[in-house]
Every structure is written in C-alpha cells, then in structure tokens.
C-alpha cells in the first residue's frame, strides 16, 4: 500500500500489525507514511514510539533530529536535547553516525562552534576517519 502511495491504507496495516506485536520497525514504517503525508506531528510521535522500543538504533535519533530541524519550529536547543538524549543510549558502534549528522545540523543552523565540537567528538569515536573529520573542523574554523 505504501509503495502504491496509499498512505492511509498503509497506516491501517501498520496499526493492524501493532495489534499483534509492538515493534519499532512498524513504528518506523508509520513514521515514513506520516512523513509522506506531511503529518509531522504523527511522524514524530511514531519515531518516539520506535525510540522507546529500540533506543539503541541510531537512525531513529537522526531521523527525529532531521525532521524536527527541517519540518517543525523546533529551536536549536530542542535539537540539542534530542541529540544529547540519543548520545546517552545509542549503540556505541554507530554513535559516530549521530555525532556527524548532528554536526551537519549544527552547521545548517549557523552554530559553527557546536558543529566543531561534534566533529571533535567524532574524531574521538572513530579515529580512523580523523583526517576527514579534521578537514570539516578546519573548513568551519576559517
């Protein structure tokens, strides 16, 4: 139904699936359907439900920050709070993905100092990419 752009129908199926099993994957599907409908409030609610069920999954946090940044009136402080909450719980192996994603969000919000801090944190988390991350810091420091 989703692929056929029948979003209401796909949401019915997702809700039916939830009656059998409360799954973060189902809530993530609902997020996608609500986003396709431009229903940002319901999309965030779906992501929040997915996060409650699987807070380790880094992409949910990234998606939430991106959605809040691009489609709501969230302040940068609101974005920072979600970021900080996510940092506390995400999978340590993928944490760097949240950090680098937030660095880009910070830069897009004209918060260069915050972006630089995030890139420095990325270096700590994944030193094998330190040259690339340092290049971002150098670019922002100009």
Image (cartoon, rainbow, N blue to C red):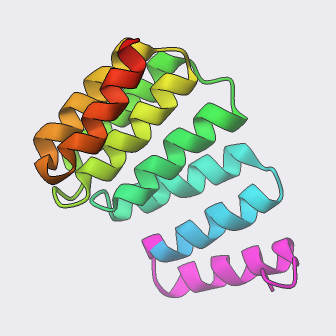
Q: Residue at the spot x=36%, y=64% of the render? A: 53
**Number of labelled discs?**
0
x and y percentages locating residue 104 in the rendered image? 47, 34
Q: Residue at the spot x=83%, y=80% of the render? A: 9
Please identify the quarter of the rendering in which residue 4 is found. Answer: bottom right
Q: In front: 112, or 24?
A: 112
Q: In front: 24, or 96?
A: 96
| Relative to 128, residue 77 above or below | above
Q: Quadrant of the C terminus?
A: top left
| Relative to 128, residue 72 above or below | above
Q: In front: 9, or 35?
A: 35
Judge from the rendering whether residue 78 lies leftward or rightward of residue 114; answer left or right: right
| Relative to 29, residue 16 above or below | below
Please identify the quarter of the rendering in which residue 29 is found. Answer: bottom right
Q: Which residues are magenta?
A: 1-24
Please identify the quarter of the rendering in which residue 88 is found. Answer: top left
Q: Predominant secondary structure in magenta?
A: helix
Judge from the rendering whether residue 5 lies leftward or rightward of residue 97; answer left or right: right
Is 29 in the magenta? Answer: no
x and y percentages locating residue 14 in the rendered image? 65, 79
Q: Residue at the spot x=79%, y=61% of the render? A: 36
Is 10 in the magenta? Answer: yes
| Relative to 103, residue 107 above or below | above
């Amino acid at each position: 139904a989703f692929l056929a752009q029948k979003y209401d129908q796909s949401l019915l199926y997702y809700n039916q699936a939830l009656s059998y099993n409360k799954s973060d994957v189902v809530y993530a599907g609902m997020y996608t359907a609500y986003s396709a409908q431009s229903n940002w409030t319901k999309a965030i609610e779906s992501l929040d439900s997915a996060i409650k069920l699987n807070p380790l999954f880094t992409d949910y946090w990234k998606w939430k920050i991106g959605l809040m940044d691009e489609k709501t009136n969230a302040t940068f402080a609101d974005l920072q709070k979600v970021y900080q909450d996510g940092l506390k719980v995400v999978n340590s192996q993928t944490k760097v993905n949240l950090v680098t994603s937030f660095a880009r969000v910070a830069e897009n919000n004209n918060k260069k100092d915050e972006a630089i801090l995030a890139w420095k944190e990325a270096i700590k988390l994944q030193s094998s990419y330190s040259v690339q991350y340092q290049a971002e810091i150098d670019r922002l420091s100009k």
